[in-house]
Amino acid sequence: ILSFLQEWFPKQREQIVKSLSEIGATKSSEIIKRAIELLPKDRSWFFENCDEKSEKEMSQLDREFSNYPDGIMSDLYRKYADKYRDEI
């Protein structure tokens, strides 16, 4: 989660939460939202500023997210595409 949120897409954090919810990945969206809340507000590197409790919580969120709590993403994409076929 950290690489995703801090290195790859730091400016799209809120859009990621919104997009996950929109495709039906509500559990994943909530996990990412909770991870964002743990990140330093000044956008510095997480491990430079976190305490042991935050580090453990981030690791737990990473495990939860990695277990695909909403199902396989490709299935969610397909379901979303089918639902909005006429609008896409």
Image: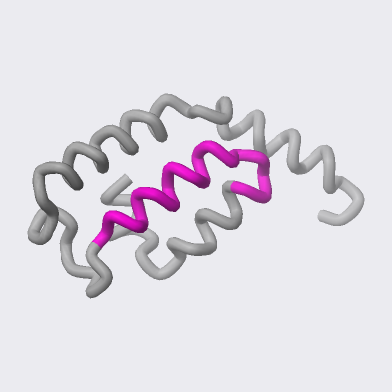
Q: Is residue 30 magenta?
A: yes
User: If the image is split into quadrants, where does the N terminus sit?
Assistant: top left
State left or right for residue 11 relative to residue 25: left
The residue at 84%/47% (across/down) is: 84
Looking at the magenta stretch, what is its main secondary structure? helix
| Along the line of sight, the residue nearer the viewer: 39 or 7 | 39
The residue at 36%/56% (across/down) is: 36
The number of numbered badges drawn on the structure is: 0
Q: Is residue 84 above or below residue 44?
A: above
Q: Give residue 49's position: percent from left, percent from top.
A: 11, 60
Q: In which image quadrant can residue 11 be found?
A: bottom left
Q: Is residue 37 magenta?
A: yes
Check the image and name the residue furthest to the bottom.
Answer: 42
Q: In which image quadrant can residue 65 be found?
A: top left
Q: Is residue 69 above or below residue 35?
A: above
User: What stretch of residues is rendered in magenta?
Assistant: 21-39
State left or right for residue 85 relative to residue 21: right
The residue at 34%/50% (across/down) is: 35
Q: Give residue 32's position: percent from left, percent from top.
A: 42, 48
Q: In which image quadrant can residue 76 be found?
A: top right
State left or right for residue 26 relative to residue 51: right
Q: Give residue 24's position: percent from left, percent from top.
A: 66, 40
